[in-house]
Image (cartoon, helix red, strand yellow):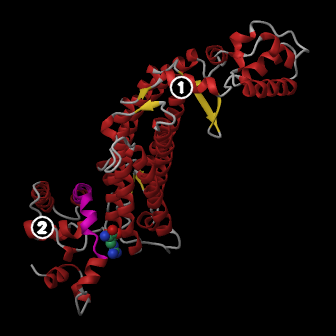
Amino acid sequence: MNSTQDLQYTWAGRFSEPVSDLVKRYTASVDFDQRMWRQDIRGSLAHAKMLARQGIITVSDLADIERGMTTITVEIENGQFQWSLDLEDVHLNIEKRLTTLVGDAGKRLHTGRSRNDQVATDIRLFLRDGIDGILALLKNFQIAILALAEREAATPMPGFTHLQIAQPVTFGHHMLAYFEMFLRDSERFTDCRKRVNRLPLGAAALAGTTYPIDREFVAAELGFDAVCENSLDAVSDRDFAIEFCAACALTMTHISRLSEELVLWMSPRVGFIQIADRFCTGSSIMPQKKNPDVPELARGKTGRVYGDLTALLTLMKSQPLAYNKDNQEDKEPLFDALDTVSDTLIIFADMMGGVTVKADALRAALKQGFATATDLADYLVKKGLPFRDAHEAVGRAVKAAEQKGVDLTELSLAELQAFSPQVALGEDVFAALTIEGSLAARNHIGGAAPEQVKAAIGRAKKRLG
Ligand code: ARG
């Protein structure tokens, strides 16, 4: 079959000359949208079944279509299917092959539908599977985060603000912060799925169709929750895809923040953790290097997912109703966001399982940063000093300790008393100033006390389901 014949097959009746090779390549999408072939066949089978039930095609046409689609499925799975650029996209390629295989029944398949509602249906089916995949991957990743949190629930580490040591937390507590972020990400995907899961078929090109179709039947066949209510909207908007990319972008934001911390923590200057060698690479020139390539790449790939979101937002803005060919450009960013997030989550689940925490380094850092200064202020407040005065007194104590090159706990009782003579500062102050004392005191829901962290892990496991 040559290109002129292929062209005749679809719309040659209206045209007097074929497009140039470049225009053909420019307008075709089959190279990338063939990825939706399973969804395309599934949607066509549901449509054909409905046409037969409604008496629009015969039962024998339906049987031919089903037989042809079975053959096509085998051909595509075995890599024998001949994808043709002349047939523009996945839809026309499959329809043409069907007609070659089964004759007129194949030509009747497109009754009462258009590629406009067909492609919108395929994308929604594809995305629904994609979301279900991501939700499963997110869950696995969170299980890995929780396992690490549980292992290090009571391991003290410095909590930072402004990248300066602020107060003690535990490594488990820190991991639980990421658990919360990724849980919200899965909620976003679950929510997005509700709006993805609507059936556009029946909208046809833009205005609906003159055949007595049964859209609810097709929706039920394909597992959609409902039909798209308006035919113009059904073929035109891709807000569900934008929403998906926005959820991907936020997930990558969280991945990127985690990556940044992993890179920082495994820098030899910090040395808080090690990640397994299989996630690192060496340097071609510096023999001593072990570079955290995976987290760095994930941080970098976050940018490309933002790009995917921006591409889709820009694609949609200013498009008049209803379908415009612009929309063919929705697929590559969508696929890219899906693939990037999926691969990242698979790798990160494995990588977090292989994190080794260096508890000694974490403790040593805590000792250098006056991390319990707030605890000293709180102690003075409990002895009756107003908080602002306590804050000032501790500020002076920190300055003195810094000048002496010691930690607050290394100041003598008399020295400490001198900073706040108004209150009865006793020996018990030293217990409040220890890392363990500081942690244990934050004993409320959401706080850093190891007891609370363990309880939070228990709840997190339940919330994960
Ligand atoms: N390949 C097209 C797409 O991805 C299918 C719809 C084409 N419709 C049309 N009227 N040109 O959007």
Residue type, numbered disc 2: Gln
- Residue indicated by mark 2: 82
Please provide the residue range marked out in magenta.
27-49
- Say which residue appears at 75% left-offset and 11% top-offset: 429
Residue type, numbered disc 1: Leu
> Who comes first in sequence, dot 2 or dot 1?
2
Measured as percent of width and height from the top left, residue 453 is found at 55, 20
Does residue 324 appear left or right of residue 375 in this picture? left
Question: For the residue labelled by badge 2, is the local secondary structure a helix, a strand or a loop?
Answer: loop
Q: Quadrant of ligand 1?
A: bottom left
40 within the magenta span: yes
- Say which residue appears at 16% left-offset and 68% top-offset: 83
Q: Nearer the viewer, residue 414 or 14?
A: 414
Checking the image for residue 161, the label placed there is none
For the N terminus, the quadrant is bottom left
- Evaluate whether residue 54 shows in this view: no
Measured as percent of width and height from the top left, residue 112 is found at 29, 68
Q: Is mark 1 within 8 Å of ligand 1?
A: no
Measured as percent of width and height from the top left, residue 22 is found at 27, 83
For the C terminus, the quadrant is top left
Measured as percent of width and height from the top left, residue 19 is found at 25, 86
Could you classify mark 1 by the number of other residues whose Cα lies within 10 Å: few (under 14), some (14-19), or many (20 or more)?
Answer: many
Checking the image for residue 362, the label placed there is 1
Does residue 298 appear left or right of residue 173 in this picture? left
- Say which residue appears at 85% left-offset and 19% top-offset: 419
Q: How many marks?
A: 2
